[in-house]
Image (cartoon, rainbow, N blue to C red):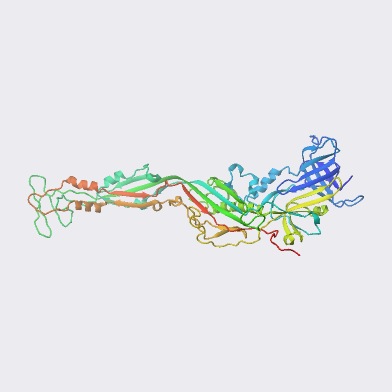
Amino acid sequence: MPGPFYFHWIGPGALPFDPGFAVNDEEVFAFTIEHEEGDFATLEIEIINPRVGLLNEDREVWAWLSYDRAWQPGAHTPDVRPLFYGRLIGIPEDLQNETVTLHFLARPVDYAQQQLAVAQGLKVSPYWDPIWFAPESRDNPDNVLESRPELWHIDRITHVVSTSNIISGEDGTITLDEDDELYSSMRLGYGSAAVRKVQVKANVTWDQSGTGSIDMEEIVGRIIETHTGKKLAENWPKSGAKLSGGWVVDEGHAELLDGDARAVYGFYHWWQTLFEGGFYSVQVPEWAGEWTFGYSGPGGGGVYQQPPHLLKIPINQVKPTLKLGWDVSRKRSEGIEFILEADVQAILTDPGDEEVMELTFSSSELSTNMDEITVDDSQIMLVPPLGDVRSPRYFSTDRGAQSIEYLIALARSHLLARSRAVNIEFAIPFNRGIDLDLSCRKSVALIDYRLPGGQAAGKITAYKLSCNGDNGELSCEITIGCCIGKGGTVTAVTGDPTYVENGYFDNVQVMDNAYVMPFAGEVNYGSLNGAAITDDGVNLYGMNAGSITKSYVVENNAAQQQAAILAASLPTGEVTVEPKPAMHEVADVFKCLDDNATKVTLTLMPLTGGPFDTQYFIPTSLLSLPKTIDLEAGVVS
């Protein structure tokens, strides 16, 4: 008979619903439409057995089920409402019986494309961070919802794919009271104990690397005065030489300038080394037979005017040049740990006894180009999360904070889902359910004195529309999930300088000078901005002569060499003139210079340090959760 339910076979993509679809291709005996959040709606329908092959390739396998809300026997003005559009799945049951049961699924033909498009728009901070996913799974649309308290929603009529929050419905709140619900149908039940704490541990690794060349002019560029300049120039590091600490000489030489004739040394004996213009002066005759000498000084004396035989040792001026090259790769790792605790009402178990969820993450993708940035207002460019491979830190950077906040979002999502620990099931009249246009994108506020506090609210987690073929009874059943949070609010605060007691965690390096609130009013955490890192002090960003030099020392310059020769020539006993004084050999002067040759020591910051590991413990506030049912409320009179 015509109406009130209509079943029409049709092809795929027959959207939107057209009133012309309200025809009886099959006689409907009974049906059940069920829709649970996060899943496709299903239709189980019992029809009079058509005695044909329903899966024949020439037949349509999609169908519309609709309902005339104003139906009555005889003439009337139709008010047709679409109830379901889907595809036949599986083999029909009981083909030998007078009626057969068919199963349909409201899965859009372009479901994958719609889902990908929605997922792409959800890849925003703090709900998305690709570093925590393997490359092959970053395009999996389900991954974008892990950090959101949301589930996929597929409309059973329009086949539009979207997401829906598990706490509050985007399409509004339906208010029902005792007059709407069937009194005896309400059932309140508890799910598993709420997860009160989520412990998160995460670790990142990367190779800190860089290359460059540094002109050491400001350190080694001063002229060195020395009596052993040739030796210094010969021993100066040459281009291509490898130095300790991972350094290499890009360019190195020492220019030996002309000698300075100001420095003239005389031949000397054990009494006094002779410097031009010094306190004593001696002239030595030619080497032939006996010889004499004279002196002048405070004690008087004479000067023999003999042809001089002087040893002249000039001061050399040496101008060094040094350019150092570096090519370094150092292993680095950082780890964070935090515990996010939900502020929820006690249920079933004592507070503190609830399950603690542990989540562990790791990533070595910081140097992979994956972050999108816009260049010139239009061009999209991919850059690595680390930003610069020379970086010695990650979690304490702005980009690192995004990774932390993603993990907080993930923990928050789990806590919100498990805080929805109370389920309320009830039934309302079928036509009321049709009028309310039920979906899993709506919430229900239920007013009933039998509830704690006289009321409760929650997201629709499931609903069922059905028609009983035996008695013609129509029903509408609804299930809502209620959140048992305490409904508080978190505000931004400034943390104390020290959070973790000594000995509680090893190698903790946290500066608790600020708290960041990634979710307004819900939670905050201790910022790592300015936190110390485990390091050797090498800054690959600021590689210059000053930053890489630990010390630069010139030993035994010309003045120091002269003092050494003088010290080696001082008399040790009574001065006499006759017999002939013992003269030092010329070689003794050069031996003294060899023993006191000018030496330059340049000590550089080594580049071969590592691996370096920094661990942080991050303090967090309690997570404030909505209170949609008050389990601690008093009796409502």
Q: Residue at x 78, y 41 (%)?
A: 103
Q: Position of residue 374 (x, y in %)?
A: 58, 50
Question: Residue 178's image quarter?
Answer: bottom right
**Residue furthest to the bottom:** 637
**Residue furthest to the right:** 74
Q: Position of residue 475 (x, y in %)?
A: 82, 50
Which quarter of the rendering shows the N terminus? top right
Q: Position of residue 189 (x, y in %)?
A: 72, 53
**Is residue 229 at all visible to an observer of this figure?**
yes
Asked whether, in this view, residue 338 is left or right of residue 220, the answer is right
**Is residue 126 at all visible to an observer of this figure?**
no
Asked whether, in this view, residue 499 is left or right of residue 178, the answer is left
Which quarter of the rendering shows the C terminus? bottom right
Question: Residue 101's image quarter?
Answer: top right
Total labels: the figure holds: 0
Compared with 370, 510 (above or below) is: below
Asked whether, in this view, residue 210 is left or right of residue 293, the answer is right
Q: Residue at x 64, y 61 (%)?
A: 488
Q: Position of residue 350 (x, y in %)?
A: 63, 56
Frontmost residue, 239 versus 526: 526
Asked whether, in this view, residue 477 is left or right of residue 250, the answer is right
